Image (cartoon, rainbow, N blue to C red):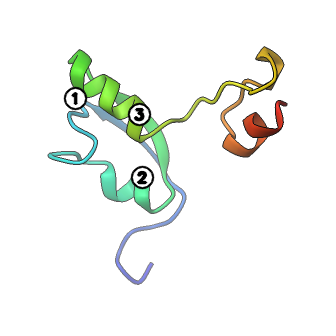
Amino acid sequence: MADGVQKNGIYIDIGANNPDVINNTKLFYEKGWRGINIEPSEKEFRMLQEKRPVFYKGEKDNSGNTFNKEVAKKGG
């Protein structure tokens, strides 16, 4: 915690906005935190989905759907 940010926390960001600009959780995400981003604007919501994926579809079939990127690559 040398930079003052605890590792591996959880956040909820309501009105998350752009994932890179005017975003309260970017630093936390970069430090390993995960959480929920709520954003009503479709444009910013899609940007958040692209930049901070949390759900991955299995490459082989739906049985590999997961929150873990490595598991999805293996197909479940």
Residue 49: x and y, percent?
A: 41, 30
**Against 74, is 7 above or below?**
below
Q: How many marks?
A: 3
Mark 2 or 3, which is nearer the eye? Answer: 3
The residue beneath circle 1 is 15
Q: Secondary structure at mark 2?
A: helix
Amino acid type for the residue under numbered disc 2:
Tyr
Which residue is depicted at the point 41% across and 84% down? 2
Near-viewer residue (74 or 6): 74
Gap in angstroms between the C-alphas marked 2 and 3: 14 Å
Near-viewer residue (76 or 24): 76
Amino acid type for the residue under numbered disc 1:
Gly
Q: Earlier in the sequence, mark 1 or mark 2?
A: 1
Mark number displayed over residue 29: 2
Left or right: 26, with 60 as reference point: left
Residue 56: quarter of image: top right
Question: Quick check: marks 1 and 2 in contact, CB under 8 Å?
Answer: no
Residue 57: quarter of image: top right
Q: Secondary structure at mark 3?
A: helix
Question: From the image, which quarter does the N terminus lie in?
Answer: bottom left
The residue beneath circle 3 is 50
Name the residue furthest front: 60
Categorize mark 3 by other alpha carbons within 10 Å: few (<14), some (14-19), many (20+).
few
Question: From the image, which quarter does the C terminus lie in?
Answer: top right
Question: Quick check: marks 1 and 3 in contact, CB under 8 Å?
Answer: no
